[in-house]
Image (cartoon, helix red, strand yellow):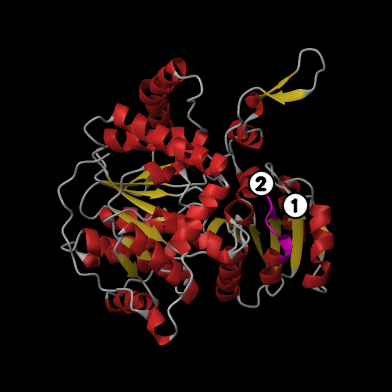
Amino acid sequence: MGRHPPTPRHKPTFTLQLFHEARPVSTYNYPYYNTVDQIYHAEWSIAKLARHELLRRSIATLWPQGHPTRLIHVAGTGGKGSTCRFLEMGLACIGAAGAFMSPHLFDYRERFSINGEFVSQDDITAAWEQRVRPHCVRLATDHPANIHTFHEVSILIALTLFEQHGVEWAAMETGVGGRYDQTRALDVVATALTNVGSDHAHMLGDERWQRVLDKAGIARPGVPFFTSDTDPENLEIMVQVCAATGAPLHQVGDAAVAALELELQQHTLDPSPDSLLHADYQKRNAALALAVIRHLAPAIDETAVLRAFANARLLGRFWRVEESVYADIAHNAEKIEALAGEIRKQFGARGKILVVGISGQRISTKVFRALADIAHTIIVTSASFKGQDPARVREEVKGIVGDIPVLVAFEPQQALRTARSLQRDDEVIILTGSTYMIEQALNPDPHLRHMSAHFGWRMQEPHEATGTVHLNLPKPAPPLR
């Protein structure tokens, strides 16, 4: 894709140590397991890899000289979006910088930002109508099977916006996993893996090593690979994947986080309550972004970068909606656990009413185990897409929450009204668990709220004779949340 001059090499501050020397070297061959997995599921894996090739060809058609933006590919179970925002804000100190992130909360345009600001709705319309849509229609006309998906179209829109706005650096967030996500088709100057947890096991594998293997698949030959994951078993897999790929591996561990905290103190940078860095768990994401920035731009003014980090904000991350009402799109067990710690730190003994919606195939018991330690009242509601039945969720978590009252509201706005009716002067309301639920509860635009709740409805048409619904075309993946 891009044809850039060699990026200046800089000896990274944090390098992966041979942590496995203290114990027998693993006899497991993880790159081979990836090979066998692809062969066992050849029809599936070949189809996925073919999507990559289709996207590469579209990028080459639209940018025959290579795309001008230097891209950084970010994957992980938690912290992808925050790491992208830190990269964007830090690299904006030396040039125009952007980010492509998912999910959006209220408006599709939230997936695209430049120098910390979302692009305009008019920007989206122009990119789609003038550049991306004509290409996609031509492609489908020539080859009817080659219809780009929602995710692929969004990537092309991001690249179009970055070119139009002269973006020099951009962070690209993976949708799900890494190895097979369409963002893997991009040529990048660095890759970053935040961590690997339990989310999306039904897509990435029941075993943790399977999920690590998938996410570590963002590694490219000769491209530096950074990770802030500190689990030894996860790191062992990354070592093998990077060695087989030829990707230099850099670990950003606890020492890097401590060094970042010390630097913030030395520069008397006190993040505001709505800053990402105000939450302790975000400092690991910031340390990861800082390591990448140091490698790509060793001459950068680090004081300016730290100041930019302290001002980094992101909609839906411990977001203060109004007085005593907060929302956070923590939608898996690991994120909920981190959020619970931050809630405990921020609000102490104050009463906490949690409005929780669970979507997809996430296991509600794992989510509620962390919430049970902090909640005074829990209101379980649904989500507009793949929302789990709140009554069933309540039954599942009875044995976990103990004496904490668990109420059911089948509609998110109803759940929020109920929470407000119960709220006392000293209590806070926190909405979490599903981005879809938060969007339906808080989106001020009724038209966008309706469109989000009915994503993909045009892909279903009633059969003329029977009136039954059938898929007219392969339904694209929904907006990832």
Instruction: Give the spatial CA distance, label 1 vs label 2.
Output: 10 Å
**Left or right placement of residue 197 versus residue 215 in this view:** right
Residue located 65% across and 22% down the image: 472
Work out whether residue 372 or residue 345 is closer to the camera in this orientation and state it.
372
Where 463 sits versus 275, above or below?
Answer: above
Residue at point 61%, 62% (across, down):
324
Left or right of residue 360: residue 136? left
Considering the numbered disc 2 on the image, is that residue within a helix, a strand or a loop?
Answer: helix
Residue shown at 18%/45% (left/top)?
4
Horizontal arrangement in the rendering, residue 156 relative to residue 175 (left or right): left
Query: Which of the two residues, 413 or 32, is positioned nearer the viewer here?
Result: 32
Looking at the image, can residue 251 be seen?
A: yes
Whole-percent x, y for residue 270 in the image: 37, 71
**Magenta segment:** 357-365
The kind of residue tagged 1 is Thr
Query: Is residue 318 something that shows in the picture?
Result: no
The label shown at residue 381 is 1
Secondary structure, magenta segment, majority class: loop
Within the image, what quadrant is residue 119 found in?
top left
Residue highlighted by disc 2 = 441
Q: Are marks 1 and 2 in contact (CB under 8 Å)?
A: yes
Position in image of residue 463 (x %, y %) = 76, 17
Quarter where residue 395 is shown: bottom right
Residue 374, image x and y in percent?
A: 68, 73
Based on the picture, tell me whether residue 299 belongs to the magenta stretch: no
Asked which secondary structure carries label 1, the reply is strand
The residue type indicated by label 2 comes to Ala
Q: Earlier in the sequence, mark 1 or mark 2?
A: 1
Residue 21 vertical position relative to residue 302 in the rendered view, above or below? below
The x and y percentages for residue 14 are: 29, 74
